[in-house]
Amino acid sequence: MGIDELLIGLNPQQREALLYTDGPLMVLAGAGSGKTKLITHKYAYLNRKHKVSPSSIFTVTFTNKAANEMRGRISSFLSNDLQNCWIGTFHAQCNRILRKEIKALGYSPGFVIYDQYDQYNLIRHILKELKIYEALYKGVASRIGSLKASLVTPEDFVSAGDGFGFDEKLAKVYVRYQDELKRCNALDFDDLIMLTVRLFREFPDILRNYSRKFRHVLVDEFQDTNLAQYELVKLLCSDSEGVSVVGDDDQSIYRFRGAEVKNIFKFEKDFPGLKIIKLEQNYRSTRNILHVSSSVISRNSLRKEKQLWTDKSEGEKVHFHWLPDEEDEAKYISKALKEIYLKGVFGYGDMAILYRINLQSRALEDALRRERIPYSIIGGMSFYERREIKDIISYLKLTLNPHDNVSLRRTINTPPRGIGAATLNKIEQESKKDGVSLFDSIKRICRARSSSQMVFERLNGLVEMLERLSGVKKMKASEAIKMIVDVTGYADGLEEDRIQNIAEFMVSSKADSVGDFLDRVSLYTRMDEAHSEDSVSLMTLHTAKGLEFPVVFIVGLEEGLLPYFKSLENEDELCEERRIFYVGMTRAKDILCMTGAQKRRVFSKLQDQEPSRFLSDIPRDCCQWIEKVRCGSLREFPRKKGNGRAVAYALPSYKTGCRVRHPKWGVGVVRDCYGEGDDMKVCVNFPGVGMKRLALKFAQLERI
DNA sequence: CGAATTGAGTTTTTT
DNA sequence: ACTCAATTCG
């Protein structure tokens, strides 16, 4: 693609943002304003026009999936191969840097990455050891996470006294935790960022290598960076010719992970002369959808004002349905989805159901299954979170790094090999006494013969096995997994589906080396899983960020759910809830329908729900407002006056399953019934003929 | 040591 | 309601 072609199809603002290379640039890109297009074109432009090679453009995205898409799009413009390009998430990029440079910080380059569950396990272990109430582990993990996101090391925390909400016990755990990670040669997610910043701060010559190498720095989803990531960007572009950050403060929804919308404002201060360009033309949604979502988000204070507009048509009205309970809500949605499907314009793959919390998927799944609507859950329990997969991953980690205590604890008796709590306790004590890893401690116990013959044999067997397995790190990951399963006897007596999962896992490793494969599975997340072509996508509002669907349902618009009850106290968190809702609405291209339920099971009790406060910010003139109460009658939504008109909720007169006769095709079974009044249509399956869609008005159907 | 039962705790969002 | 963990029993 030529340079001129890169400019074609860009609007004036996008074009300006692409051409601006004289200094730092911030693009405030509203939802659906062609942000990815801008970034990919800019990347290609830098390469074509300014001869910046892909290895000199540092590009961060929010998910691996976004990175892959970006890579794909860019490589379609450029003939260069992107083998050596730097396009990835913060975590992946930092991992790549640290694999090379981490020796400077006293870790070895073969470090393993601990995911959240590894982190939990380690913290629980430490809490137990320090005799602190163990159930606090989640809270402790999140506190430590936010300290790391703010670049507060254990030493800082201890010496700062009261500075960061000091807590003596927390300090103790944090120090011990970080110590233990280092001893295991392990990094948690936050370490990947924090340690890279530390590396650059403490070793200016290393920083110089990178900051000179990267002539341009591009940051996507800038509103979701935390302090550590912000600092990293600042360090990396200290010698660069240009830095472009792209983001939308209205879509900042990761506060709980340390994301600071403030960074958008801070950037202006830190980079004087910053050029700010707003992208306000929306290419995604109809005018109605855009109007509704803008009205909701405009209620937030402290935002960069944007006037989104579109030249699309008004489109269908935004729907809101209030239903008696959770089951009715799910049932209503399934019916509505099917109705849309049967109209033939949209396939199931064009539809998404979004909810605030994963828990909400259950009722929806039941209803969808009942209606035989294909669906897939995006997010939820990831493949990599399954027990058998985590076990195999632990073995893989151990082959690279036998001092990984967390993985050793996990696998020491899996599959059962007669090493129980008593033995493990002894090992733990010895290792603590000698200050060595569990693995070393086991070896010492064996060497000293300081145990019973039986224990010795078992431990010795374990050591021999692990040493034998350490040879697999030179293999391809798939061979390594096979070897692990063979040597450990992991699959013996395992359920068939779990064995299948392991087989699938093996296939997914492709031709990767063990190290590459581990990096990939550690940094990949469920968000990166591909969507199915022809099934309805179910996911949380968070997961939906960055995606778009022609048809979007947002469920559970109730006080306590959206906004979520934990956020009700705090004004900032309420603003974030509103943004979460906004992100959901702006995913919709053509049809947006929202629902809520009067009664819902919360904490296992049936609760009366109030409609979400956000609904009162929705202008009624672009809305269809329907409330269905238990008895099936309808009434106008009571909370606010408006011109929303209630529409009759017609129940199908031909119920699914009833039998009909057609003059030509004979007897068939009604599979579905939709539409109202004269437009009422039915779907009938005639044995031997197939599925037929018939308008009741014309087809001469006879009920039998 | 391992399986099974009881019991407690937990329900946001995820790189 | 449900999951996950500790405890108890075999």
Image (cartoon, coloured by chain):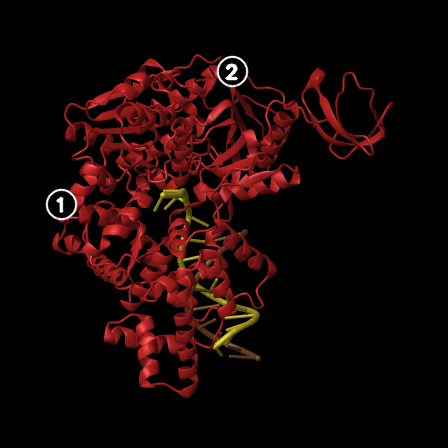
Chain colours: A red, B yellow, C brown
Decide if residue A152 is on the left or right side of residue A64.
Answer: left
As rendered, which of A434 and A68 lies closer to the eye? A68
Give the number of callouts: 2
Q: Quadrant of residue A344?
A: top right
The residue lying at 47 percent from left, 65 percent from top is A484
Give how far across and how far down residue A518 sits, in percent: 39, 54
> Mark 1 = which residue?
A204
> Does residue A306 appear in this view?
no
Q: Quadrant of residue A363?
A: top right
- Quadrant location, the N terminus of chain A: top left
Amino acid under disc 2: Gly
Above/below status of A6 relative to A421: above
> Mark 2 = which residue?
A315
The residue lying at 39 percent from left, 29 percent from top is A79
Decide if residue A498 is on the left or right side of residue A396.
Answer: right
Give how far across and how far down residue A85 sits, in percent: 33, 38
The residue lying at 61 percent from left, 39 percent from top is A367
